[in-house]
Structure formats: structure tokens, C-alpha cells
């Protein structure tokens, strides 16, 4: 997870746990984007079928997790998308 600056949370009155969720969301969104880009490369195509399937499943799980984080952030009044 990204470094978390406690003073940033108090500056905008966002609770620390929500700030951590926001950082986690941003980090995960970046990793999802990078993995999605990798899934469209020749390197990915050269992998064994099982490895390809596992990476696609990993991306699906990451997207699901991202969606759950966004729902939690909405519940806290801080939707990301």
C-alpha cells in the first residue's frame, strides 16, 4: 500500500481509515490497469494456457475487489468513480 500521511487525513477531515481505502483503491486501480495492458501483449500470448487463465482470473478478482472498495468508499461518502 502507498505511504499514508496522517496529516493529509486531518487536513480535509477525511477519516484515516477512509484515506487508507482511497490509497488502496488508487494502488489497486493502477495495478489492474497495468495487468490489463499486459494481457494484450505478445508476452502474454506466449505464456502457457494455464498461466494465461490464471492471470485473467487474477485480473477479474482484482476488478471485483476494486468494485468492493468503491462501494465501501461510497458508503463512507467518498466514491472514487
Image: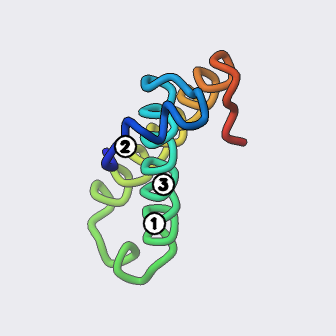
Q: CA distance from mark 1 to mark 2?
A: 25 Å
**First in residue order: circle 3 vs circle 2:** 2
Which label sits on residue 9? none
Say which residue label 3 marks: 32
Q: CA distance from mark 3 to mark 2?
A: 24 Å
Q: CA distance from mark 3 to mark 1?
A: 5 Å
Residue closest to the eye, 44 or 63: 63
Image-based side of 38 in relation to 3, left or right? right
Q: Secondary structure at mark 2?
A: loop
Say which residue label 1 marks: 34
At a point 64% along the width and 23% down the height, the residue shown is 71
At a point 60% along the width and 35% down the height, the residue shown is 12
Image-based side of 67 in relation to 28, left or right? right
At a point 31% along the width and 48% down the height, the residue shown is 3
Say which residue label 2 marks: 5
At a point 31% along the width and 44% down the height, the residue shown is 1
User: Which mark's residue is nearer the viewer, 1 or 2?
Assistant: 2
Residue 11 placement (x, y as % from top left): 54, 37
Is there a contact, CB below 8 Å, between mark 3 and mark 2? Answer: no
Is there a contact, CB below 8 Å, between mark 3 and mark 1? Answer: yes
- Residue 67, above or below 44: above
Neighbour class for label 1 at 10 Å: few (<14), some, many (≥20)? Answer: few
Neighbour class for label 3 at 10 Å: few (<14), some, many (≥20)? Answer: some
Residue closest to the eye, 7 or 71: 7
- Residue 54, above or below 9: below
User: Which mark's residue is nearer the viewer, 3 or 2?
Assistant: 2
Amino acid at each position: 500500500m502507498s505511504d499514508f500521511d496522517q496529516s493529509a487525513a486531518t487536513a480535509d477531515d477525511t477519516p484515516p481509515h477512509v484515506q487508507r481505502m482511497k490509497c488502496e483503491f488508487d494502488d489497486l486501480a493502477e495495478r489492474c490497469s497495468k495487468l490489463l495492458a499486459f494481457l494484450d501483449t505478445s508476452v502474454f500470448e506466449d505464456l502457457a494456457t494455464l498461466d494465461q487463465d490464471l492471470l485473467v482470473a487474477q485480473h477479474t478478482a482484482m476488478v471485483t475487489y476494486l468494485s468492493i472498495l468503491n462501494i465501501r468508499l461510497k458508503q463512507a461518502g467518498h466514491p472514487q468513480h
